[in-house]
Structures are given as C-alpha cells and as structure tokens.
Amino acid sequence: MVDDKYLLALSAFHLGMALFCTNQLLLHQRHQRVYVPLALFFVTQSVTEMLSILDLVVVDESYDYVVSRFNSLHVPAVFAQPLLLWLYVRALTSEDNGPPIRQRLWHAVPILLAISMVVLFWTIPKSLFAQNDLEFADLSQYIQAILIYFQLVEVLFYIQVTLYLVLIMKMLSRYRARLKDLFATTEDRELTWVWWITTTISAYLLLSVAEILADLFGIEMFQLFSDASDLTSGLSSLAITWVIGIWGVRQQPGLMPKTHSAPAAAEQELVAAKYERSALTDDHATRIATKIERAMTKDLLYRDSNLSLWDLAKHISVTSNYVSQTLNMTLQSNFFDYVNKWRIQDAVKQLHDTDETILVIAHDVGFNSRSSFYNAFKREMNTTPSALRAARPAP
C-alpha cells in the first residue's frame, strides 16, 4: 500500500496550488465572466483536498464516522467541477455572454443529486460505521435503498462528465473555425492546452470506468495499479490542476481584438459567426472585394502580423460584417486563408528573388513564427520553403 505520508504531501501541495490559482484568478479585473468559473473550479478542488487531508490526519477510529460524514461533502464539489470547467471554456470561446445559464437549469441537476447524497449519508446510523464486513443482505431496506441510490448517482456522474467533455470539444471546434474568420494569425489564440486537458480527462474517465467494470465482474487488475490507485489518482488530478493553473490564469478570451481601437462598440453585433441575408448586393460585394484586393496589393496589409478582420474593415472603411460576407461569398475564402495566401505568394517571390533567410522572409510577410510559416507554406504550395528555394534556377 502507498504510505499515507505521500498522499498527505500530495494533497497539501494540491491544496496550496488550488488556493494560489483561485487568488490569482480573482485578481483579474477584466473578463470576470471567464475567470470566475475557473476560480470556483479551483475552490471545489480546495474543498476536496482539505477533506482528503482531514481523512488522512485523523487516525482515531472512534472519529471515523465523523470524518466519513464530513468527507461526504466532497461529492457536490466533485460534481460541480465538470460544469465549472464547461462554463469556463464556454466563456473563453464566446464572443458574447452566450445564453443565460438560468435557461439551462438541467445543469444543476447533478449537483442537486450530489447534495441529496450528502443528506442521505448523514442519516446513516452511527452504529454502521463501527461494523466491519457487513453484507448487503444484512442491511435494512432503507440503507439498501440509499446504497443503490448512491450507485445510480455515481453512474450519472460518469454520464455527466462524458456529456461535458463532448460539449467542450464541440465548442473548441467551433472556436477554431471562428478564429479563422477573424484573425490572420491564430497560434497565440489557439486553445491547444484545453484540447490536451479534455483528451487526458477522457482517457482517465475510460480508465476509471474500466476499473469499475473489472471490479464488478471480478476481473483482476494489474497489482501495481491496484496498490497505487490512490497515488495514481492524486498525481493525475494534480497534473491536470497544474496545467489548468499555468494556462488558465493567463489565458485571454480569443475572439476579441487585443487593442481597444477595434471594433467600435456599435460594431459588436456585426461579428456574429454566421450571417443572415442582408442588404449587401452583388455589386456592392464586388466593390468591397476590389477594395480588399487593393489593400493587399498596394498597401501590403497582409504583412501586419496582428491583422484582424476589424483592422481590414477599418482600413477600407467598410463594416466588418460586410467584409466577412464578401470574403466568404464573393472571394470564397475565410479571412485566415485569404490573408495567408497573400503572405505565401509574397514569400514565394522573395524566395526566388532574394537571398534573405527563410526566417527573415517569414517575419517580413507577416508570420510570427517559423513553424506557422512552414505549415501555411506546405498547405498552400505542397512543398517546403527550403525545397522551393533549392529548386530555383542558378543565376
């Protein structure tokens, strides 16, 4: 068995990290709708770790029933974590506040069931805590019903986690597509770390379900995993908290401009992901397309590494909604692909005509990193910058 002192040290470190992240998140003055759900997520982890420490510190068996009852309080905290993580990602990937949560009261059902578990657990007689090796058949019908209810709620918890993971993955997919409608450079706004967290939790969920099924059907698990399950669980939870803490504390909402100059308050409604039919006629769209092309060919606007849809709209004196519609319906491209196509065309010309290094060319045409330049170049030209330069005719 794993020594309790290791579990105690792990829980204490986890508690300190959760409290520190909570404090840092609550210090944010802007975007509180993003950071408050994540702060509450760390509060629930703090509650869970404090109760774990209580369970490890109190060794007097006469207080087992008291510790067990108080330790049941971690159940609502654990049930709240998937909801809070979903609320955080939802706010992080939204352009507005989204639908009010009060219109989706079903999100509160698992937490209410968890609270009911705590209430029922506290009704279990003290005498049962002092008895060992109790058979299910020897228990009263009331206690049997409570235990069955607990099992059903536990199944609901796994369903809840699965549902929120699916919802988060869908939000991330929509977010990635929307980034390309608004920004020419997206790597500093990508939420790759959230993808990794979601994937890790999914894998851990599958492992937990496998362990439960193995125990249910009497299948022997690996002895090493069985002996160290508490430590493994603690380390996994700590690793997830660590990653969320490192990235979540500093992560900014991605679908907003980094400068205050764009867009103006009156244009906020013009940045919706999809548009309905508007007053934009074909002739008007053609004129806007001409302005966009001129901004690229004459003004070399694509060389701005922080170029956004709002910047382009301001430059050509057209609303961002009309610019986006023109790109999608007239030029048949999203903003990201359109701008990066111009960047790659410029880079190809420089690779042929100059001896500048590839990194210098990448930065000159508007890319922030060598990797993003290579990825865009390979996607557009089906070859690498090095291979293209090597194939140019000798002077």
Image: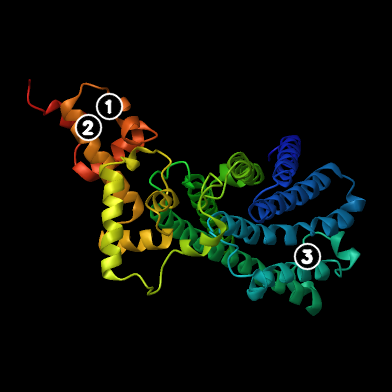
Disc 3 element: loop
Name the quadrant containing residue 70.
bottom right
The residue at the point 80 percent across, 47 percent down is: 50
Using the image, determine if residue 61 lies above or below residue 145.
above
Q: Earlier in the sequence, mark 1 or mark 2?
A: 1
Rendered residue at 60%/63% (across/down): 97
- Foreground pick, 238 / 385: 385
Q: Nearer the viewer, mark 2 or mark 3?
A: 2
Spatial separation of the CA atoms under disc 1 and disc 2: 7 Å
Look at label 1 and name its amino acid.
Ile
Q: Which mark is residue 358?
A: 1
Secondary element under disc 1, as helix, strand or loop, is: helix
Q: Quadrant of the N terminus?
A: top right
Q: Position of residue 179 (x, y in %)?
A: 43, 53
Does residue 249 lie above or below 182 as drawn? Answer: above
Quarter that holds the C terminus: top left
Q: Residue beneath label 2, please?
A: 385
Residue holding disc 3: 134
Q: Earlier in the sequence, mark 3 or mark 1?
A: 3
Work out whether residue 217 can be spotted: no
Give the x, y percent position of residue 357. 27, 22
Within 10 Å of disc 1 (Cα), the crowding (few <14, some 14-19, many 20+) is some
* Residue at 38 percent of width and 63 percent of height: 322
Q: Which amino acid, by three-letter code, is at mark 2? A: Pro
Gap in angstroms between the C-alphas marked 2 and 3: 72 Å
**Who comes first in sequence, dot 2 or dot 3?**
3
Vertical order, 263 against 259 (above or below): below
Residue 239 visible in the displayed image: yes
CB under 8 Å between callouts 1 and 2? yes
Q: CA distance from mark 3 to mark 1?
A: 73 Å
- Residue 312 at what x, y percent from top left? 39, 50
